[in-house]
Image (cartoon, rainbow, N blue to C red):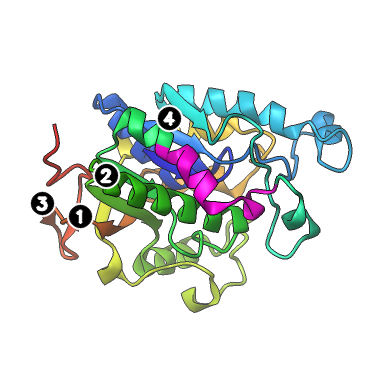
C-alpha cells in the first residue's frame, strides 16, 4: 500500500516498484490524498482548468491518474476520503495552504482514520510513503507522511499493522552521479546545482535499506508519466533521462526502512532487493 499526496507522485517516485509488484501478482493499493488542483498545466488547450480560472484541474487529473495506474498494472486506487475530500494545498507558504479543504489543514486523526479504513480492508504487509520532510518539503507530502504513519500506528494497536514501512529516498551517491550525468541536458532543473548539499533531499547511502530494480518495467513507468500530460510536458527533461539513462535512473527506486527487519541483502551497500523479503504474514 502506497500513500501519495497528488496524482503523478506515484509515478515519479515509485512507478517502477508498483509496476514490478503488480506484475508479480502482489496486491498493490494506491492511496492519493488530493486531486492536485493547484498543479501547473502544460497542455495549452486545458489552461483554463487551472485553480484561478475554472478550477476544474482536479477532475481532469482523476482521468490522468486512472490511465497512469492502468499503465502500471495497478487496479486498486483510492482517494483518501473519496475524490475531492481534501484539496491540494499548493507549495509551502502560499495562501492556498489556508484553504478550508487544504490537506495541510486536515485534522490528523480524522484523515488517519480514513486511511485506517483502507488498511483494515486491504491489510497491507508493506507500507510506502514519504519521510518527515515529505521528500522535498511540500506541505501535502509532509501531511501524507503524517497521515500514513498515524494510520499505521492505529492499525498496529488493532493488531494488524504493516510488517514493514518504507520511506521513499534517494542515495547521495545516486544524486551525485545524476548531477554529473545530467549537467548538459536541456531543461535540467538541477543544472546549476554544484553539490547534493544544495538540494532539499538525499540520504547517506548507509541510511538506504532497499534498491528495487524495476528496469524491466521502465516502459510502463514512462507510459504512466505520459498519462499525466498536464503535469509532465512532452519536452520534459524526465523523458530525456528516460531515453538516455532509462535503466539506471528511471527503473531503479530506493527506500529507507523505518519499521520491520531487513530481509535478504546484497551488494556493496547491503541493500534489500525485495520489499517483501522477511515478511512472514501470509
Do residues under tags 4 and 3 come within 8 Å of each other at their CB atoms?
no
Q: Which residue lies at the image location 53% right of the left edge and 58% below the top edge? A: 142
Residue 209 in view (yes/no): yes
**3D distance between C-alphas at marks 2 and 1:** 9 Å
Q: Earlier in the sequence, mark 2 or mark 4?
A: 2
Which residue is identified by label 3? 264
Q: Earlier in the sequence, mark 4 or mark 3?
A: 4
Q: Residues within 10 Å of mark 3 (few under 14, many from 20)?
A: some
Task: For mark 4, give the secondary structure.
Answer: helix
Q: Which residue lies at the image location 46% right of the left edge and 61% below the top edge? A: 181
Q: Quadrant of the C terminus?
A: top left
Do residues under tags 2 and 1 come within 8 Å of each other at their CB atoms?
yes
Placement of 4 over or under 69, stated as above or below: below
Question: What residue occupies the far right of the structure in this picture?
Answer: 53
Which residue is identified by label 2? 162
Residue 124 horizontal side relative to residue 7, left or right: left
Instruction: Pick the residue in front: 46 or 100.
Output: 100
**3D distance between C-alphas at marks 2 and 3:** 18 Å
Q: Earlier in the sequence, mark 1 or mark 4?
A: 4
Which residue is identified by label 4? 220
Amino acid at each position: 500500500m502506497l500513500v501519495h499526496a497528488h496524482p503523478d507522485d506515484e509515478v515519479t517516485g515509485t512507478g517502477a516498484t508498483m509496476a514490478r509488484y503488480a506484475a508479480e501478482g502482489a496486491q498493490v493499493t494506491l492511496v492519493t490524498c488530493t486531486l492536485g488542483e493547484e498543479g501547473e498545466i502544460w497542455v495549452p488547450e486545458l489552461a483554463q482548468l487551472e485553480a484561478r480560472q475554472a478550477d476544474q484541474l482536479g477532475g481532469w487529473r482523476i482521468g490522468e491518474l486512472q490511465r497512469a495506474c492502468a499503465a502500471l498494472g495497478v487496479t486498486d486506487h483510492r482517494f483518501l476520503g473519496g475524490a475531492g475530500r481534501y484539496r491540494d494545498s499548493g507549495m509551502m507558504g502560499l495562501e492556498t495552504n489556508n484553504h478550508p479543504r487544504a490537506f495541510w489543514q486536515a485534522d490528523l486523526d480524522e484523515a488517519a482514520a480514513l486511511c485506517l479504513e483502507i488498511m483494515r480492508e486491504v491489510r497491507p504487509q508493506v507500507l510506502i510513503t514519504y519521510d518527515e520532510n515529505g521528500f522535498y518539503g511540500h506541505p501535502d507530502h509532509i501531511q501524507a507522511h503524517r497521515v500514513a504513519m498515524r494510520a499505521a500506528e492505529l492499525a498496529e494497536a488493532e493488531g494488524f499493522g504493516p510488517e514493514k514501512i518504507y520511506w521513499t529516498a534517494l542515495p547521495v551517491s545516486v544524486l551525485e552521479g545524476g548531477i554529473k550525468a545530467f549537467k548538459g541536458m536541456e531543461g535540467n532543473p538541477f543544472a546549476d546545482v554544484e553539490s547534493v548539499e544544495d538540494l532539499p533531499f538525499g540520504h547517506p547511502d548507509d541510511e538506504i535499506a532497499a534498491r528495487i530494480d524495476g528496469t524491466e518495467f521502465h516502459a510502463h513507468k514512462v507510459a504512466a508519466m505520459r498519462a499525466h500530460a498536464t503535469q509532465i510536458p512532452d519536452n520534459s527533461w524526465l523523458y530525456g533521462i528516460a531515453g538516455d539513462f532509462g535503466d539506471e535512473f528511471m527503473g531503479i527506486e530506493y527506500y529507507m526502512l523505518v519499521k520491520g527487519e531487513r530481509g535478504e541483502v546484497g551488494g556493496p551497500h547491503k541493500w534489500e532487493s525485495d520489499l517483501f523479503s522477511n515478511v512472514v504474514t501470509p
